[in-house]
Image (cartoon, grey):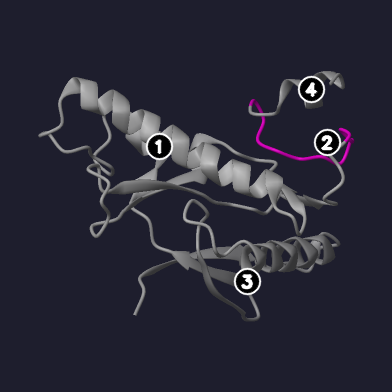
Amino acid sequence: NIPVAIKRMLKSDSPQETRLITKVTGEIELLKKINDHVNIIRYQFSDTDNLFFYIALDLCDGTLVDLLNPNNQTVTISSDISPAEHIFFKIKILKDIATGLDYLHTRTSGKIIHGDLTPNNVLLKKVEQSQDPYKMKALISDFGLSLEVAEDLSSVAASASYAGTRGWKAKELLTGKK
């Protein structure tokens, strides 16, 4: 009885279908491997039919974009929190993201490079039972472009096939310099 959000991807008869199947199955397998960290979105189950692939993930309350947008009505911080505490809350969210990335980048069973970390891919979830005074945590999501690399590698060379969100690529991927 866990509330879930369903990520739905349309199947097609195009030549890209094989790549989509590989991408979806790769994302599902990766989510299963990293399903044990507090700052990574929780995978619940997946399914498919004639038209779509479905991935069920924990339901969240919004994104980092929602939190940072002053006109936001989706994710709100308690009005009981002072302006100074708002800063501490934002630092806490940054710490959650950094903790999730550290986990991905230092796993002994294979490092993971997210490949598309944007404010839209950082989800916020309310956690009522938490000792955290803000009752919210950040979760890294959308592992469709992620790469799993050998534990002895410290970087991945930029390639023409590397994909990510336009405007959010690391400088070294754009310039080819380390």
Per the rendering, the mark at residue 93 is 1
Question: Can you identify the residue that label 2 sits on?
Answer: 155
Please, what secondary structure does the residue beneath circle 4 have?
helix
Q: Amino acid at mark 4?
A: Glu
Q: Indicate which label's residue lies in the foreground, 3 or 2.
A: 2
Q: Amino acid at mark 1?
A: Ile
Q: Indicate which label's residue lies in the foreground, 3 or 4.
A: 4
Question: Can you identify the residue that label 4 sits on?
Answer: 172
Pointer 3 or 4: first along the chain: 3
Q: Are marks 1 and 4 in contact (CB under 8 Å)?
A: no
Left or right of 71? Residue 97 is right
Please, what secondary structure does the residue beneath circle 3 have?
strand
How many angstroms separate mark 3 from mark 4 (CA)?
34 Å
Residue 65: image location, x then y, percent: 41, 35
Q: Is residue 153 above or below residue 109?
A: above
Pointer 4 or 2: first along the chain: 2
Question: Can you identify the residue that label 3 sits on?
Answer: 53
Pointer 3 or 1: first along the chain: 3
Please, what secondary structure does the residue beneath circle 1 have?
helix
Q: Are marks 1 and 2 in contact (CB under 8 Å)?
A: no
Q: Nearer the viewer, residue 165 or 178?
A: 178
How many angstroms separate mark 3 from mark 1 (CA)?
31 Å
Q: Amino acid at mark 2?
A: Ser
Q: Is residue 28 above or below residue 120?
A: below
Q: Quadrant of the N terminus?
A: bottom left
Please, what secondary structure does the residue beneath circle 2 have?
loop
Question: How busy is the neighbourhood of tag 4: few (under 14 within 10 Å), some, or many (20 plus)?
Answer: few
- Magenta segment, which residues? 157-167
